Image: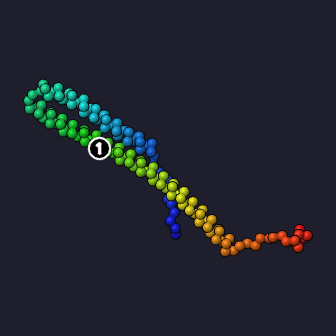
């Protein structure tokens, strides 16, 4: 059996992928915005607050700030992975379509060569009118 292209289309919903990636980016931006607003509030509290509870609270705040930054980073990374998968699906579909077109073109060339070889190997007799047969027509 000879090679054939993949005749199945790539099933991928690019609009849904774009929407998901956009939502992930938006969530990361919201986390960044919240972190910036909280940092401003923390700076004010840091200037005014003293005591043991302050240290516990600021340690907890720092951990939560780091967790939020990590989450925002992971959200962006997942959005990038979705975009890369979307690009790969578009590329794969284009590749399949090109391979199909190339294969069909090559099949037509092969069919024409085979037909030409058949005609060359078995020429068909062509009726030619000669003067002695003219009166019979």
The percent coordinates of residue 28 (x first, y second) are: 31, 38
Horizontal relation, residue 122 to residue 13: left or right: right
| Image position, residue 106 (x, y; %) | 56, 62
Q: Quadrant of residue 58?
A: top left
Instruction: Give residue 116's position: percent from left, percent from top.
Output: 65, 68
Name the quarter where the C terminus is drawn. Answer: bottom right
Q: Which residue is mark 1?
A: 74
Q: Residue at x 21, y 39 (%)?
A: 66
**Is 110 located above or below residue 80 in the figure?**
below
Using the image as rendered, state which of residue 114 and residue 27 is in the foreground.
114
Looking at the picture, does residue 36 appear above or below residue 131?
above
x, y (%) of residue 81? Answer: 35, 47
Q: Residue at 31%, 45% (x, y): give it.
A: 77
Can residue 8 be seen in the rendering of this structure?
no
Residue drawn at x 35%, y 45% as measured from the top left: 80
Lateral position of residue 50 relative to residue 134, left or right: left
* Viewer-side residue, 129 vs 54: 129
């Amino acid at each position: 059996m000879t090679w054939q292209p993949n005749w199945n289309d790539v099933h991928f919903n690019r609009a849904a992928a774009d929407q998901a990636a956009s939502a992930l980016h938006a969530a990361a931006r919201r986390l960044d915005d919240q972190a910036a607003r909280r940092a401003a509030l923390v700076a004010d509290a840091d200037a005014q607050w003293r005591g043991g509870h302050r240290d516990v609270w600021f340690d907890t705040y720092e951990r939560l700030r780091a967790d939020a930054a990590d989450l925002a980073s992971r959200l962006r990374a997942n959005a990038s992975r979705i975009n890369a998968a979307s690009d790969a699906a578009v590329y794969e579909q284009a590749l399949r379509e090109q391979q199909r077109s190339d294969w069909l073109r090559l099949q037509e060339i092969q069919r024409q060569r085979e037909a030409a070889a058949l005609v060359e190997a078995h020429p068909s007799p062509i009726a030619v009118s000669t003067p002695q047969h003219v009166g019979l027509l």
